[in-house]
Amino acid sequence: MNNILTSYIEQNKRIKLVETIALALSLLVSLACFVIGTARVQASPGNTAYIGSLEMARNMEEEDYDEDCTVCDVVYMSGEKKLVKSYPYDEYVALDSESIIAYEYECNNGTRLYFDHMDPSAEETDKAYRETMAEAMMPVFNLANSLVILAISISVVLFFSRFFTTYEKCWFMSIMVLATVISVIFPEESANGVSGIIIMLLYLLDTFLNILCELLISKQSRYNFLVSVAVEITEIVICLVLMYRFATMAVTLFFWLPIDIISYINWSRHKDDVEEELTVVRKLSGYQEILTILAIAAWTIGVGYLLSGLDIATDFLGGNRNLELIVIYLDACASAVGIANGLFIFFRLREQWIAWYICALLESIINILSGQYVLLVLKLGYFTNTTYGYIKWNRYIREHKQLQGSIF
């Protein structure tokens, strides 16, 4: 027995050492990426040499404007070469040219810059160089951001190691490592005047908080609601930044935030008699499930119809109205299932895992249509942990049938 205990202690020490090294490496590489990226963006372009002129075509899909803009950017491209020219709003709406003559210059380090006139000033050259390098360094900054979030994830596993099983640690870190890789391979473009780097950071933070919250729910821990508050705030910010999914944003603001606080109180009142970290859970009856399905259908049709009539402009979906309508109705359905899910969680009902499955499926479709590939990693986390949580809750319910009384 002593040999087994000693072996277990030694193995645990080795795991903690690996986790500590991984944490240190993540922070060091992240810092190096920030320093390298910032240095490249802030560097001087040096002397520039004129290469020649070329015709570029207007790319309206990349333009970002609305009626409140005083200055609008127009994007011209020729293959991978790009020129962004700013116009006052009055000139922008009157613009009828579909192409422009661009003048190409080369910096000392080989970087190519493009202008709409000959002999740009030093100030214009510096600005164009910084913008070009910022776009080129986006994968580096995304890697730096993702490694910071990864380091936070490792810290959770390291400092709360006794709270999680080996499987839970492996699942949690696998999702975060995968999110790190995807964030570099599929960087986000800027939208509504917000840098793609900031948008990606919000996605990564949302992924981290959501899977941690999901894991705590599967463990029947009331502390999931404290993490969930941070989830809701992050997702409200994402909706505002991208100017989309207003049904989800409204439900998050007026339903999820209050229900998280109330649910924490309710779960705290129903602790397991043997293990206080666990909360007593139960399941729905048949007729209650039918009423829930009907309510979700009614909400989807009503809210979807209401939101589809609003004139809200966003360049996030490329101005595709049909795509916007599809996302609106999917979002309305996801928000309805989300409300049902919130009530199921409040009442400690097993059916909340079924709602998680449906939400994950609907949001996966929205993420694919919107090109939010890094958030698909989060949905993979949902699907896998939902299965894990459903099995755990079912086992607990079978073993504690005598506790399946009042839902309050």
Image (tube, rainbow, N blue to C red):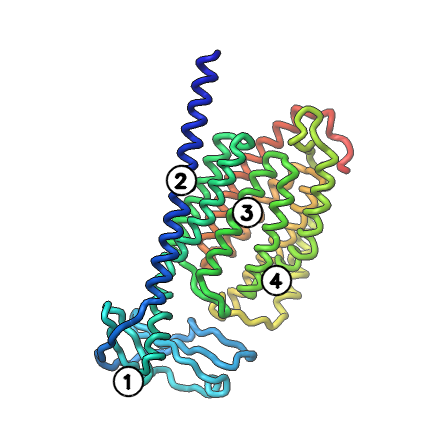
Q: Is residue 318 left or right of residue 44?
A: right
| Residue at image mark 4 | 246
Question: Crowding at label 1, few (<14), some or many (≥20) Cα neighbours within 10 Å?
Answer: some
Q: Nearer the viewer, residue 280 or 282?
A: 280
Image coords of residue 232 (percent x, y)? 61, 53
**Position of residue 335 in the picture relative to residue 69 (left or right):** right
- First reached walking from the N terminus: tag 2 or tag 1: 2
First in sequence: mark 4 vs mark 1: 1
User: Real-space Cα distance between discs 2 and 1?
Assistant: 50 Å
- For marks 4 and 2, the one nearer the N-term is 2
Residue 365 appears in the picture as rendered: yes
Determine whether the residue tagged by mark 2 lies in a helix, strand or loop: helix
Residue 335 rendering spot, x and y as whole percentages: 63, 54
Tell me the crowding category of disc 2: few under 14, some 14 to 19, or many 20 or more residues within 10 angstroms, Cα based.
Answer: some
Task: Give the CA distance from mark 3 to mark 1.
Answer: 50 Å
* C-alpha span from label 3 to label 4: 21 Å
Q: CA distance from mark 2 to mark 3?
A: 20 Å
Camera-side mark, 3 or 4: 3
Q: Amino acid at mark 1?
A: Asp
**Mark 1 sits on what residue?**
119
- Identify whether 29 is placed above or below 129: above
Which residue, given by chain and number where applicable, does mark 2 sit on? 22
Residue visible at 71% across and 25% down in the picture: 273
Residue type, numbered disc 4: Phe
